[in-house]
Image: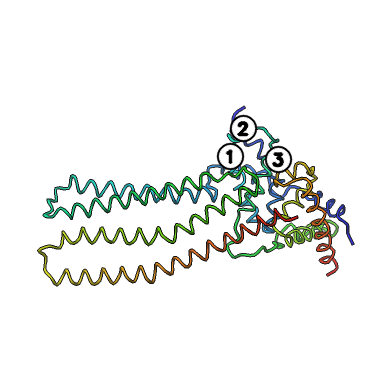
Amino acid sequence: MEINTDFKELYKTNSNAVYKLCLGYTGDTALAHDLLQETFITVWNNLNKFRGDSNWNTWIYRITVNTCLSYLRKKKEITYDISNPIFSNLPEEINYKEQEISLLYKSISCLQETDRLIIMLVLEDKPYEEISEIIGISANNLRVKIHRIKKQLTEIYNNYERL
Amino acid sequence: MKDFDLLKDSWNSTGSRISENEIKKIANKKNKKSNKMKLQHQQSLGAILLISTAIFIAGLGIFGNFNFEYWYTYFGMALICLICLAEAGIMLFTFKKIKDIDETASPIIHLEQWNDYYLFRKKQAKWNMPLYYIALNLAIIIYASGIFVGRPWKGIIIFTVVYIAWMLFAYFYLGKKTLKKEDDRLNGIMSELKSKISQINQE
């Protein structure tokens, strides 16, 4: 198959999940777009390095994690972008759901950088073995971490919800 | 009170947030540069400019028919060429260092590679800029001393005073200020990278 077609297919299949990860990491739609773009530029430049040891998704997730972690703040702290028009002018029920999601993103942005990425992979329902491969830590260490992050995220979310 | 499974349900109910059009737009932008490529580009462009300068000066010295009276005028020109080439070599080495950073490695290795690169830049900033500056100015002084022979004293003195004043100002004020700024910037970046590495390592 042609590389160009391959890449477009990879992009189509993975871009939304990668974007969600970048949005949860940065808490900012514009930055998330930049990171999404940067991730796929890196994927494109490294296509020849893919050896097939893992599947394409795992490989792309690892590049996403690396892109997010090597993104440096430039003195700007994470700000959660709630000005997004999708959160306003919606029917009440949908609006409530969106607010819930918005709160979830906000809670994720309160976690440490690597914890944000790990928990988003858990939320995406990735198997622990795959997450451990993406993050590059042992499965045991990952289990301990996930247990701690889950607790922390739930607490932050419930605190926000009470406000 | 919500438990984690309910949060997961909320998360999974979030659909696509980028339109098909946007997907197409970004997919076609694969020729755009990533941050790593931009850093590489800065180094390669700098090296190309320095090599071109060295070739240009060497060309002037060889084919310019200037017939300078003193050998050290040519020596000054040759020295400028060598310094430009040496600096270009350092830039190409830095280019290679950035190129070697593997974005497909595990996050800890990837972050450590960036940390090593910034540590290298920090060390390099301390000796490279002052050394390049001093060597280039010495070469220019050697070149100029040949050119100035037989010219009116007044002009030579004015030029020398202005040149030395500028050199001292640039070295002791601008140079130190730039080095401090660069040092602070690199320290900030490295501490951020180290904090992320320790986050991954911590249980």
How far apart, in angstroms, are the residues tagged by discs 2 and 3?
20 Å
- The picture quadrant where one finds residue B197 is bottom right
Which mark is drawn over residue A5?
2
Locate residue B131 relative to residue B5 in the image: left or right.
left
Whether tag 1 and tag 3 are in contact, CB under 8 A, the answer is no
Q: Could you confirm whether marks 1 and 3 are on the same chain?
A: yes
The 10 Å Cα crowd at callout 2, few under 14, some 14 to 19, many 20 or more, is few
Q: Amino acid at mark 2?
A: Thr
Q: Amino acid at mark 3?
A: Thr
Whichever of callouts 1 and 2 sits on the residue coming sooner in the sequence is 2
From the top left corner, tell me how far across and down residue A82 is, in percent. 72, 62
Whichever of callouts 1 and 3 sits on the residue coming sooner in the sequence is 1
Q: Could you confirm whether marks 2 and 3 are on the same chain?
A: yes
Whether tag 2 and tag 3 are in contact, CB under 8 A, the answer is no
Whichever of callouts 2 and 3 sits on the residue coming sooner in the sequence is 2
Mark 1 lies on residue: A44
